[in-house]
Amino acid sequence: MLITFKKMNRGIGHIIVNLNDTVNSIVLAINIMVGNPTNTDLELYEEVKPTMIDRMNKKLTFKVAENQNGDIICAQKVLSIQESQKLEVKHHGVESFLTELHKKSG
């Protein structure tokens, strides 16, 4: 199954996964693609449509999670409370970022 990854609404790469692999199995590959330390914890979201995402359960297999060939996955670093407080940005997560992006485009 071919998965596409997005970061800040831009494609960053593709990976082929086995349907029986857990969703968590792709975290290392994503970290390498974006230049994160390999042990960075990530939240993963499936882009259902451009204005809708669903948080993925990383313990499930891709088959049980009902992922399909060509699905788009968005990733976000899990921030500590201290990291969140240091960031002075309006949108702290993938969900609020996509909501705001949709409001601006239409």
Image: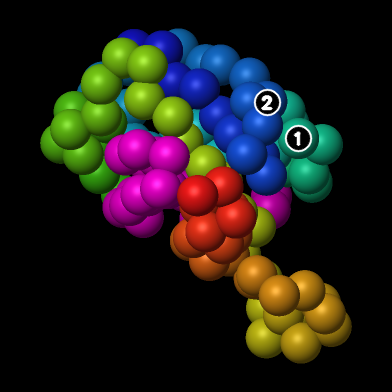
Q: Are marks 2 and 1 in contact (CB under 8 Å)?
A: yes
How crowded pointer 1 is (Cα within 10 Å; few <14, some 14-19, many 20+) is rated as few
Q: Is residue 81 magenta?
A: no
Q: Give the residue pinned by disc 1.
A: 34
Residue 13 vertical placement versus 104 (above, below): above
Relative image position of residue 59 (x, y in whole percent) = 31, 49
Overall secondary structure of the magenta section: strand
Q: Is residue 82 left or right of residue 16?
A: right
What amino acid type is highlighted by mark number 2?
Answer: Ile
The earlier-in-sequence mark between 2 and 1 is 2
Residue 33 figure quarter = top right
Residue span colored magenta: 39-58
For label 2, the SS is: strand
Residue that appears at 78% across and 44% down: 36
For the question of whether residue 47 can be seen, the reply is yes
- Mark toward the viewer: 2 or 1: 2
Residue farthest along the front direction in this orientation: 106
For the question of whether residue 42 can be seen, the reply is no
Relative image position of residue 35 (x, y in whole percent) = 82, 36
Q: Give the residue pinned by disc 2.
A: 12
Which circle marks residue 90 in the picture? none
Relative image position of residue 64 (x, y in whole percent) = 15, 36
**Which quarter of the rendered picture does the N terminus lie within?**
top left
Residue that appears at 31% across and 14% down: 69
Cα distance between the residues tagged 2 and 1: 8 Å
Q: Is residue 52 magenta?
A: yes
Residue 36 vertical placement versus 76 (above, below): above
Numbered disc total? 2
What amino acid type is highlighted by mark number 1?
Answer: Val
Q: Is residue 9 left or right of residue 82?
A: left
